[in-house]
Amino acid sequence: MRLRSEIEKLEESNLAPYAMKSSRSRGRKYPEEEHPMRTAFQRDRDRIVHSSAFRRLEYKTQVFVNHEGDYYRTRLTHSLEVAQIARTLARALRLNEDLSEAIALAHDLGHTPFGHSGETVLNCLMKNHGGFEHNLQSLRVVDHLEDKYSGFNGLNLTWEVREGIIKHSSEHDHPGLMREFEPESRPTLEAQLVDLADEIAYNNHDIDDGLASEMITIDQLRDIDLWQENYEKVLKELPGYPPKVQKHQTIRYIVNMLATDLIENVYKKTADKKIKTVEAVKNMKKPLVTFSSAVSKKNMELKMFLRKNLYNHYRVIRMAVKAERFITELFKAYDSNPEQLPPQVFKQIGSNNKERIIADYIAGMTDRYALDEYKKLFDPYVKV
């Protein structure tokens, strides 16, 4: 039987000097006796997996709305792919896998139904009430909205996981930081890894889903270096194989290429800059976890292609416009007459938090629940 104390000793001896060790965590908001066999970060990961918000990710849009088909990624499958990539990167770099995995699994807990279009419209609706941003909402979920434990609201996660959630950043994410999380400093390398694991995951599964939906084609991708150089390798290695197999293998090669470049580049940068401690990581002006310049350029070309040809495809835009209509009408209906809210939600409304409670309720909806609510409120032939 391996005790927590033994695992913590292994972390001290086996992880890189700049890795975040669980025994050195800043701890939790509300003191708790730690588990005898799980580290603090393992426990955080488990609390996230067992949360209601995590389960609801199964029916929240990534790019394609759930009812468009069972094949396409959802926020849940995306989060699992990000966690898998983050663990691989962390292990190769001798970082804390459990910390990276916990942050990865939690990074989208605050997402609205209908993807980024849902977030955009909810932010507009909340502009006079503090706005809405999904990283801030993810932190609100784990700090306040989950209610499984006695003695405190939320999941009572460690400071490091909470920092990783609020400092998660990509081209879509621009979280506002509170002083508690030292906005002038970088997060741990484990948290920085999740940012790039997120990017690797969504770029490549969006290629897969885009091709499956026929919104993009292999002919269009031939002009993208990252795709074409790996696709040509696959065609030479697997001539005559079904296109589905060739597509999958190409995406696999791209993921491997990006992950390998990232690992090698981080090793080089930490060595060149003589990084020896977590404090040194946090004091860097720029993130240490990046692709090399050559691969970064190729990755940016792929991202721009997906933005132009997939995210701005007319079918995706049509769904975004529908999402705007659904969420706007739901918000206005609840705002004008809050008694339409379920009793457990309505009772939370006080003198100055009505809009935030409504935003919490809508953000927590799955795609299909939001559609059902819309029908119940506005279709006279649907039972309420």
Image (tube, grey):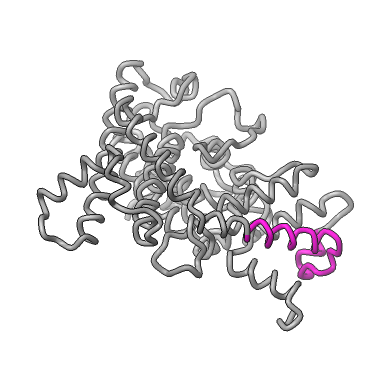
Q: Position of residue 370 (x, y in %)?
A: 64, 66
Q: Give the quadrant of residue 257.
A: top left
Quadrant occupied by the N terminus: bottom left
Residue 383 appears in the picture as rendered = yes
Q: Give the quadrant of residue 132.
A: top right
Q: Position of residue 120 (x, y in %)?
A: 64, 47
Q: Position of residue 123 (x, y in %)?
A: 69, 46
Q: Is residue 329 above or below residue 100?
A: below
Residue sitting at x 34%, y 57% = 211
* Left or right of residue 259, residue 315 in this image: right
Tell which of 279 and 87 is nearer to you: 87
Residue 341: in magenta span: yes
Magenta-highlighted residues: 322-348
Point out the residue furthest to the right here: 351
Report how many numbered discs are placed on residues in the image: 0
Tell which of 136 and 74 is nearer to you: 74
Q: Give the quadrant of residue 130.
A: top right
Q: Main secondary structure of the magenta part?
A: helix
Q: Is residue 271 above or below residue 381?
A: above
Residue sitting at x 48%, y 68% = 68
Point out the residue furthest to the top here: 273
Quadrant occupied by the C terminus: bottom right
Residue 369: in magenta span: no
Q: Is residue 319 above or below residue 14?
A: below
Residue sitting at x 59%, y 64% = 366
Residue 44 appears in the picture as rendered = no
Q: Position of residue 139 (x, y in %)?
A: 61, 46
